[in-house]
Image (cartoon, rainbow, N blue to C red):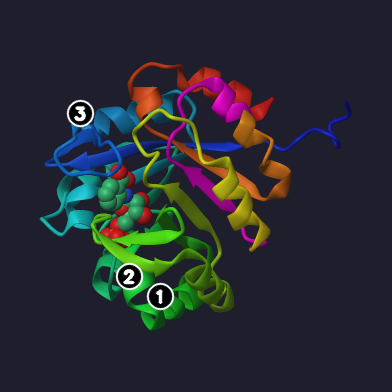
Amino acid sequence: MSEFNKTPRLVLLPAVDIAAGKAVRLTQGEAGTETNYGDPVDAAADWAAQGAEWIHLVDLDAAFGRGHNHSVIKKVLRQVKGVNIELSGGIRDDESLESALDMGAKRINLGTAALENPEWAASVIAQYGEAIAVGLDVRGTTLAARGWTKDGGDLWAVLERLENAGCARYVVTDVTKDGTLQGPNIELLKQVMARTHRPVVASGGISNLDDIAALRELVPGGLEGAIVGKALYAGAFTLAEALDVARN
Ligand SMILES: O=C(O)c1ccccc1N[C@@H]1O[C@H](COP(=O)(O)O)[C@@H](O)[C@H]1O
């Protein structure tokens, strides 16, 4: 096959979710289901050293509205070099957005604010362009807000609004798959990609290298990347193995 015909690669974003200063993984986003994976700076440095181009960094305490992890996030952004940070959790107004960008996050993932404050979301999408993604966190086709504890509206209605606002990118999470190692929701991703020409990043459920290969097949249709969480921490495969499947 010529270089021209090759399926373009899938970008992999290892997830570093932070609660109470530690890197953790949750199951289906539920508070209290944490497995602890140690210092977030070490986790992020490890993924960067293993070749990650992006890290999906989540402040879970801010997402749940029960505090924040700004000091450890600043440490990650200061100390972990050579990797782009996509930051999410609790970024809901000008102050939190500007602070996240000032800390050095390359991209901000808005969740609750994009559902509860459409005008503000549209204004920052217009102002910051590629630096803003919206996380479409869903159960079925109902969006989830406020630490995934509240319904946030209909996926297709919100997607249409965000398309009209010019949103640059969507991070699509099937909440019911997140942290379960049950495989990604390919059908949901296809349905979202059919409704937008913007890049889509998949999140939730990756359990093995076949899942990465299946997601890579979606790249020509608009899938840009995939967030990998529990499978990496549980040692189901290494990041190097996953990058190999995502690139070849
Ligand atoms: O990633 C998780 O496991 C998670 C669990 C529960 C709530 C949120 C979670 N993740 C991230 O948080 C943002 C939403 O934060 P906010 O609503 O803007 O404050 C979401 O996009 C996920 O990336």
Query: Mark 3 or mark 2: which comes first in sequence?
Result: 3
Q: Relative to 241, say whether 106 is above or below.
A: below
Left or right: 144, with 18 as reference point? right
Q: Relative to 82, say whether 43 is above or below.
A: above
Residue highlighted by disc 2:
113
Q: Is residue 39 magenta?
A: no
Can you tell which mark lies on residue 194? none
Residue highlighted by disc 3:
35
Rendered location of residue 56, percent (x, y): 39, 43
Q: State the residue in front, 81 or 191.
A: 191
Q: Residue 22, located in which quarter of the rendered image?
A: top left
Asked if the residue at tag 2 contacts the one at tag 3, i.e. Cβ–Cβ closer than 8 Å, the answer is no
Q: Residue 246, located in which quarter of the rendered image?
A: top right
User: Which element carries disc 2, helix, strand or loop?
Assistant: helix
What residue do we see at 40% from left, 75% from top? 121
Magenta part of the chain? 196-213
Mark 2, ligand 1, within 8 Å: the answer is: yes
Can you tell which mark lies on residue 121? 1
